[in-house]
Image (spheres, coloured by chain):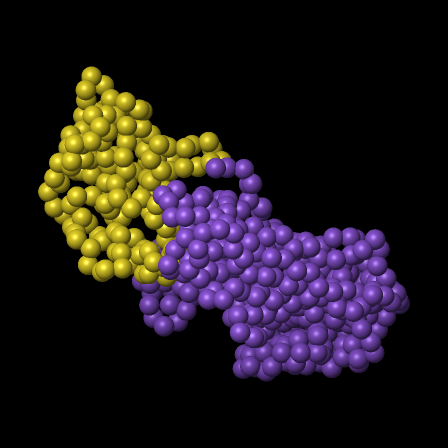
Chain colours: A purple, B yellow
């Protein structure tokens, strides 16, 4: 059975009006994996856990981390590589990169981890990178660092980012998990700001096992690598923005590679996730009739015996109507994702406003983000946002917890995945 | 181009949420009619909705006998309504099946504290009656809060407030 990625596009409005001005067109692109990744020869995994064992991890947190690590080892096959590095004021190689074969021995080593000391993340990352690279160099593998921390690292932030980039450039993805309210979300986000990487917020230690297991599952189902999307826009048009909205909201960096051809690098592709992107396209002034706005081309390298580059194309036609009064209604699915994306952008802008001392602007943006979230059905998150907007006006600052909840909640990166919109309605 | 009713930013036609402030531009761009009391447009390329400056409402040109208008003062949007219909004012909530005749959610109703089922307007013996439906933040007629369930007659030029959202009646 063939395995591949299928493209489906939904226009924000099914038609445009004839106009002498450019118009904004929203396009939702579903990229749907088809075929089953489990039927393919599996590519070996190279997973390195980098665990904060500073004294604040003592108790339930470390207990859950150790439990989650044990389960991961249980689930890995004998061909996969596992390593575990802990860090506090220094880094320790608890399990050096090795096949997950001698599971009892590995489990024993995990059980011996104890919490003490401070938080120096860079040494942990450097040690992890060095250790897992010995294995990564041996062939095509799915490499990943799973970093978990509950605190702030002091003084070595820029080194952490440098190390993350070095890893990512060598096709080692990073999942950075923050737990509790103390960790530095700016740092984790910067470290994870690349395709193949993500930062996630764990609100309670009870979730650690599930999040670890999901990450392993995601690695196991990767069926395509080096995925990229090219958007070739009609003359006079422009691709204004390109954001991932599913499985979580994240801006994708765009490069105008050639004249009117924008390229987005999307990294590795796990078969567990349908990915959805929202494009904002400025259409040139158009005459009535059927017009083509753009052509989308997806490139990817499948995993398995057939490894040459695959290509999927999709045209984006739109009907242009003579000017009249009734604008076609906005598609409800497009509106749902757009509303959430706008909320995400507003809150991101609000934190920048706070940095530059514009507290009132920040509060206003948060309030609007709350409205957008409420209207897209995210009642609980909307209330958190509203509360922070009020707190901001009153005290001039937001709470650490609220900030994290909003940052990660608006992206759909706390606990549960984003709910799908109801497709009915109007 | 269209101008955001909330922050005045310019947006390309077709934009759903203002690029600057995130306000919903849905519904606003379709209703291109303005009230007679609106300030003249100051920018040639179509400032559709200048903020309304307080001015005496002028009776509008004769329209159908059964028609009256509600003007939403923050956006200048004028909504044409039928006197013979029962009009529900509130905020749409499709999950709960609430679809008001006038969805104030599109005009900042949430921020202004408009309830989903806020108020109603019905015709009774040639009089339009406004009734508060037990809204959370109250319905005000010319500054006086209405008792829930006690309809009051409406007249041309009356000022209504739902929560903090201001509207004016034009007949």
Residue furthest top in the image = B125
Question: How many numbered discs sit on the rendered protein?
Answer: 0
Residue at the image point whose x is 50% and y is 37% from the top: A425
Q: In the rendered view of the protein, which quadrant contains the C terminus of chain B? A: top left
Horizontal and vertical percent position of residue A43: 82, 66
Q: Is residue A203 left or right of residue A35?
A: left
Q: Is residue B101 visible?
A: yes
Instruction: Write down the quadrant of residue B151 in the picture.
Output: top left
User: A330 or A137: which is nearer to us?
Assistant: A330
Q: Is residue A364 above or below residue A330?
A: below
Q: Is residue A398 left or right of residue A83?
A: left
Q: Is residue B108 visible?
A: no
Q: Is residue A27 left or right of residue A288?
A: right
Residue at the image point whose x is 38% and y is 48% from the top: A323
Horizontal and vertical percent position of residue B123: 24, 22
Instruction: Write down the quadrant of residue A4 in the picture.
Output: bottom right
Q: Is residue B137 left or right of residue A410?
A: left
Q: In the rendered view of the protein, which quadrant contains the N terminus of chain B? A: bottom left
Q: Is residue B13 above or below residue A86?
A: above
User: A188 or A30: which is nearer to us?
Assistant: A30
Q: Is residue A367 above or below residue B87?
A: below
Horizontal and vertical percent position of residue A367: 37, 54
Residue at the image point whose x is 42% and y is 65% from the top: A349
Q: Is residue A15 above or below residue B64?
A: below
Residue at the image point whose x is 71% and y is 57% from the top: A5
Instruction: Write down the quadrant of residue A250 in the picture.
Output: bottom right
Horizontal and vertical percent position of residue A65: 70, 62
User: A189 or A251: which is nearer to us?
Assistant: A251
């Amino acid at each position: 059975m063939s395995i591949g990625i299928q493209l489906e596009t939904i226009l924000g409005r099914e038609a445009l009006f004839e106009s002498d001005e450019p118009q904004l067109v929203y396009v939702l692109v579903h990229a749907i994996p088809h075929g089953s990744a489990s039927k393919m020869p599996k590519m070996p995994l190279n997973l390195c856990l980098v665990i904060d064992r500073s004294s604040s991890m003592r108790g339930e947190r470390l207990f859950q981390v150790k439990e989650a690590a044990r389960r991961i080892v249980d689930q890995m096959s004998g061909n996969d590589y596992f390593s575990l590095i802990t860090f506090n004021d220094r880094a320790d190689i608890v399990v050096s990169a090795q096949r997950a074969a001698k599971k009892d021995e590995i489990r024993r080593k995990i059980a011996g981890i104890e919490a003490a000391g401070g938080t120096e993340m860079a040494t942990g990352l450097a040690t992890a990178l060095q250790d897992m690279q010995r294995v990564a160099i041996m062939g095509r593998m799915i490499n990943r660092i799973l970093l978990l921390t509950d605190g702030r690292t002091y003084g070595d932030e820029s080194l952490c980012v440098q190390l993350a980039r070095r890893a990512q450039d060598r096709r080692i993805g990073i999942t950075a998990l923050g737990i509790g309210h103390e960790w530095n979300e700016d740092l984790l986000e910067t470290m994870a700001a690349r395709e193949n990487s993500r930062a996630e917020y764990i609100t309670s230690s009870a979730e650690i096992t599930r999040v670890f297991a999901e990450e392993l599952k995601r690695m196991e189902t990767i069926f395509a690598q080096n995925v990229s999307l090219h958007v070739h826009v009609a003359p006079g048009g422009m691709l204004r923005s390109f954001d991932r909205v599913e499985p979580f909201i994240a801006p994708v960096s765009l490069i105008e590679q050639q004249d009117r051809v924008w390229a987005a690098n999307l990294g590795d592709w796990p078969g567990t996730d349908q990915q959805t992107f929202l494009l904002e396209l400025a259409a040139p002034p158009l005459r009535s009739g059927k017009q083509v706005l753009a052509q989308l081309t997806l490139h990817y390298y499948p995993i398995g015996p057939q490894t040459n580059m695959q290509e999927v194309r999709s045209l984006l036609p739109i009907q242009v109507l003579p000017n009249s009064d009734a604008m076609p209604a906005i598609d409800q699915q497009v509106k749902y994702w757009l509303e959430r994306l706008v909320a995400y952008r507003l809150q991101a802008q609000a934190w920048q406003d706070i940095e530059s001392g514009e507290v009132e602007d920040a509060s206003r943006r948060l309030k609007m983000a709350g409205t957008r979230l409420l209207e897209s059905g995210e009642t609980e998150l909307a209330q958190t946002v509203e509360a922070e907007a009020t707190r901001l006006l009153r005290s001039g600052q937001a709470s650490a917890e609220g900030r994290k909840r909003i940052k990660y909640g608006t992206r759909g990166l706390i606990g549960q995945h984003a709910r799908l919109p109801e497709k009915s309605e109007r | 181009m269209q101008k955001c009713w909330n922050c005045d930013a310019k947006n390309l036609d077709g934009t759903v949420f203002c690029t600057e402030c995130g306000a919903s531009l849905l519904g606003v761009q379709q209703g291109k009619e303005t009230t007679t009391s609106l300030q003249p447009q100051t920018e040639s390329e179509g400032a559709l909705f200048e903020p309304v400056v307080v001015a005496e409402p002028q009776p509008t040109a004769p329209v159908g006998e059964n028609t009256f208008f509600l003007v939403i003062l923050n956006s200048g949007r004028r909504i044409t309504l039928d006197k013979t219909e029962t009009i529900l004012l509130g905020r749409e909530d499709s999950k709960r099946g609430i679809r008001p005749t006038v969805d104030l959610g599109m005009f900042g109703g949430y921020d202004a504290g408009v309830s989903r089922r806020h108020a109603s307007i019905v015709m009774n013996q040639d009089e339009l009656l406004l009734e508060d439906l037990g809204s959370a933040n109250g319905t005000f007629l010319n500054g006086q809060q209405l008792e829930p369930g006690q309809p009051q007659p409406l007249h041309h030029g009356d000022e209504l407030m739902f929560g903090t959202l201001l509207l004016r009646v034009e007949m």
